[in-house]
Image: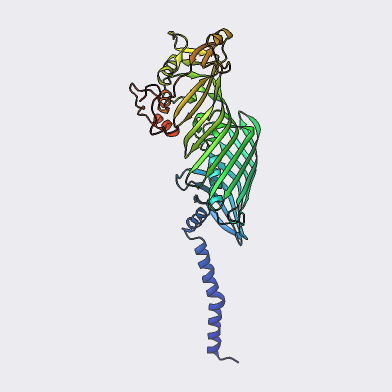
Amino acid sequence: MLHETTRKWICRRAFVACCLIPTLLVVGAVGYYHRPWRMATIGQQLSASLRAKVSLGQAWQSRPGVMQYRSIQVRDARTDRLMLTADCLQVDRHSGAHTYHFDQVELPEAGLASLLRLLETQLVTSEFGEIHFQIDQATLHRDQASDVLNLKNLHFHGKRASDRQAQTAFQLRAQAEYQVEGQVLPLGLILKCRSSEDSHHLKIELDLKSTALPGWILQGLIVGGPIFQDAQFQGVILWETDLQHTQGQLRGRHTNLQLQQLLSQSSQHQWSGQAMIDWDQLGWRDGRMVEAEGLLRSSRGSASRSLVADATKLLYCQMAVELGSEPNIAFDELACRFQMGAEGLILWGECQLEPAVAAGQNLAQPSISRCLLAMQGVPLLWQSKYIVPVAQLVRLATTPTHNWTLPATREAQRLAQVLPLPEVTGHDSRTGK
């Protein structure tokens, strides 16, 4: 039989080992789990994983290697612009694979661009051999409008090649529908990616040949996005990025383009009518246009007298008729083929003329009439004979000044930052300056 002192010694140590220490461990674990800075720490870890700024409402580990997140906001790490919000996100890390599973995602108006930036960052910088993105439903709302784009069952899967010199292919598909004015229109969305591990370049192709996508969805993806926000695009868009520089190309057609959108909001000119642009080539680098070539067509519209007059002064076009006193000039055909780059802007007129008028012009090719604007086959405006400096286009689209300088307005500055930079040795082909 143990002595009473021995029994007390055993009981005390048993109490410490079986009661006090487990209690302190539980209290410490609960306190550590509910520490005030816990969400900030987990948010920083997820931010490092996504290469973006992430804020969270709740987070917990459901099983080993699997984290659950609630009330997520993802912002661009450089601009702090909102990229997406989500109700729930599950992140699974197992055997060199990284899986992100979103349930309901809300995207801003330029949300498609935000989603692609998130994907391109993961593809170029991720250390995981396999990457999976799954979004049950993503919704894009147009600001101050009822237009909605729904992307359902969006799956993205990428697997890096074992050979570091080999290129790895990725592909994203989604079931999409576009809701506008109470109508639901199905869309097809195919995105193909190709990454080169040795150079950390990413090439992305957005195939819209069988689908006309609303222009506001493409804001942030193509140069001059606000101009085409009310139009529709059908064709192919290509990007290439290394996270420092981004360049892109576009081929296809913009339809339902409002001519007034080609002018700035502060412009005193009026240009009414719907147009379409067939793009042979539209290229840009880091948000600035490099080259543009295509055909602008419109029918049954009108242009203000001041716009036509400035087209003769700034774009060196030639009037075919005398301008009257009427404020607007009606036309039934606008056909302008254009080519723009660092050397300047070149315009060709392709309006269909009356046979007698065309015969009087001695045209080498009847299909190229040199007429930019016509009314019932009668020319109103002839094309320019010269290469036009790009700065003249800025002056025409904004508020022209009385001298040869650019207008000192923010709209003129924004437009000048998008158009091609002129060559250092470039000069005005008309004046020689």
Residue farthest to the left, as pictured: 403
* The quadrant where residue 257 appears: top right
Image-quadrant location for residue 352: top right
* Left or right, 367 with reference to 340: right
Residue 236 seen = yes
Front-lying residue, 355 or 124: 355
Image location (x, y in percent) of residue 235: 61, 33
Q: Position of residue 71 (x, y in %)?
A: 54, 49
Depth order, front residue of 378/387: 387
Quarter holding the C terminus is top left
Vertical comparison of 254 with 196: above or below: above
Residue under the point 62% across and 48% down: 169
Residue 229 position (above or below residue 61) = above
Q: Quadrant of the N terminus?
A: bottom right
Q: Nearer the viewer, residue 311 or 120?
A: 311
Across and down, in percent, residue 427 comes to: 38, 28
Q: Is residue 50 left or right of residue 172?
A: left
Q: Foreground: 51 or 33?
A: 51
| Left or right: where 159 falls relative to 36 | right
- Expressed as whole percent of the image width and height from the top left, the position of residue 98 reads 60, 55
